[in-house]
Image (spheres, rainbow, N blue to C red):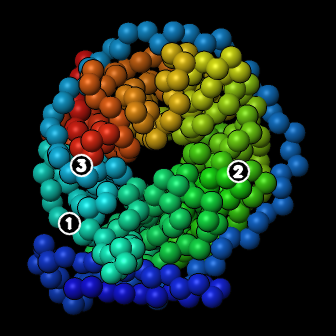
Amino acid sequence: MTRLRVLTLTGATLLCLAITTGCRPPEPEEASHSAAPYSDPRPAPSVPPPSLTPTEVSLPAPKAPGAPTHRMEIAWSLGTAAEGLATHPSGESFYIKGFNGLAHVDAEGRPIEEIMGPPDFDPAGGPVSLGMEQLVRVAQLDGDTRPEFIVFGSWGQTVSAVDDDGEGLWVYPGPDTGTDDVWVADLDGDGEDEIIIGYNGSGGLHVVESDGEGQWADTSIGNCWHVVAGDYDDNGTVEVLSTSAKPQISVYEPGGTPDALLDLGLMPNMVRVVHRGERSPVLVGAGHSMMADSVAFGMTHGGSAAWVVSFPAGRFGHLSEAMPALDRPWVAMADMGGGVVVLDAESGSVIAESPPGFVAGGGLAWLSPPDEPDPILVAASDHGEAKGFRIVP
């Protein structure tokens, strides 16, 4: 069955088509999951540019990466058009998004269900469905127990929400500069996620409500290659963080008030927050030093722990993804056209590297199956395969 929703925004008509498949039995009517009656989203209003003095962060001298302490052993390979990967909230399965659609897959690489089929095309060859976005984040948009999905494309023109029946909910009318990165997090504690979007060029940083309504934006920064949310300073509040064309990491309070400009003495192009239970979170990222070395870095707020690891020049030239592990202080980084490296966020030590011959092509997803002693890292290859790696000592 095909459902079509038309959103009319400032004179432009966006076609939001979602495809549901017959791959699972129909649910009783009272348990059906229908799209909420969202209004047409509006773009986020810009917040005043930050008037902050950059905070100089003193990082230690770079160290060599050292030999890995674990191995990445291939457990299975799923030959499909995979680019975007996202972990199910249980940590026991994951989702694959590519130009062939959106599917739910278990920890052994076995398909569970197809959520969205391939995109439809009009007679002239143009896409008319949400299926063109090849990347995905799992979100909670309506406070129930079933996940929704934010689908987007690298340098794509749309960021869209889809429910777990594959039905489109909304399309955010952001700038046409192209999307760099998307992250989801509950910034205000209401049980529904906000969507953080980093745009290419002059598009800036946007934060969007769960219904697609723009909440706030900072367009004083551009080329927001990667964005994230987390309580990086351990004060009980989730902050929004973004890289940009500036040699800084911009930090914002949930409502958009600029909080800090972190000057790390390098050009960061990746940022993630790794939580460690009751201990202070670690801000982890990667970029280039002023001497053009490729580096990964980690630091706690206040500098109680910090490290910098230097890699061969060009190693992190095009970081497509970085993803913290679910149950240990690790972070995986995928360098598109290169490999995958797993780092210990506390020390910078190399946990594991992808085997020779594996070339990263996109997303990452961590799994922690209850019957597995070792975590599984799912990585998309440059050939569109999703490979499951066990991280073993």
| Mark 1 Cα shell of 10 Å, populated few (<14), some (14-19), many (≥20) | many
Where is the N terminus found, in terms of image quarters? bottom left
- Which residue corresponds to the image point at 50% horizontal and 60% vertical from the top-left? 156
Q: Mark 2 points at which residue?
A: 222
Residue 240 at least partly seen: no
- Which residue corresponds to the image point at 68% horizontal and 70% vertical from the top-left? 44
- Which residue corresponds to the image point at 77% horizontal and 43% vertical from the top-left? 260
Residue 376 at least partly seen: yes
Q: In which quarter of the image is residue 25?
A: bottom left
In the rendered structure, find residue 92 and report the number of the disc placed on it.
3
- Residue type for callout 1: Glu
Q: Is residue 68 left or right of residue 76?
A: right
Nearer to us of marks 3 and 1 is 1
Could you tell me residue 277's position as x and y percent? 47, 37
Check disc 2 and report its element: helix, strand or loop. Answer: loop
Where is the C terminus found, in terms of image quarters? top left
- Residue type for callout 2: Gly
- Which residue corresponds to the image point at 22% horizontal and 38% vertical from the top-left? 388
Marks 1/2: CA distance? 36 Å
347, 204: nearer the viewer? 204
The single residue placed furthest to the front in the displayed view is 124
- Residue 19's place in the image compared with 309, above or below, is below
Could you tell me residue 298's position as x and y percent? 58, 26
Identify the mark nearer the N-term, 3 or 1: 3
| Mark 3 Cα shell of 10 Å, populated few (<14), some (14-19), many (≥20) | some
Identify the mark nearer the N-term, 1 or 2: 1
- Residue type for callout 3: Glu
82, 351: nearer the viewer? 82
Check disc 1 and report its element: helix, strand or loop. Answer: strand
Q: Mark 1 points at which residue?
A: 114
Could you tell me residue 77's position as x and y percent? 16, 40
Q: Quadrant of residue 59?
A: top right
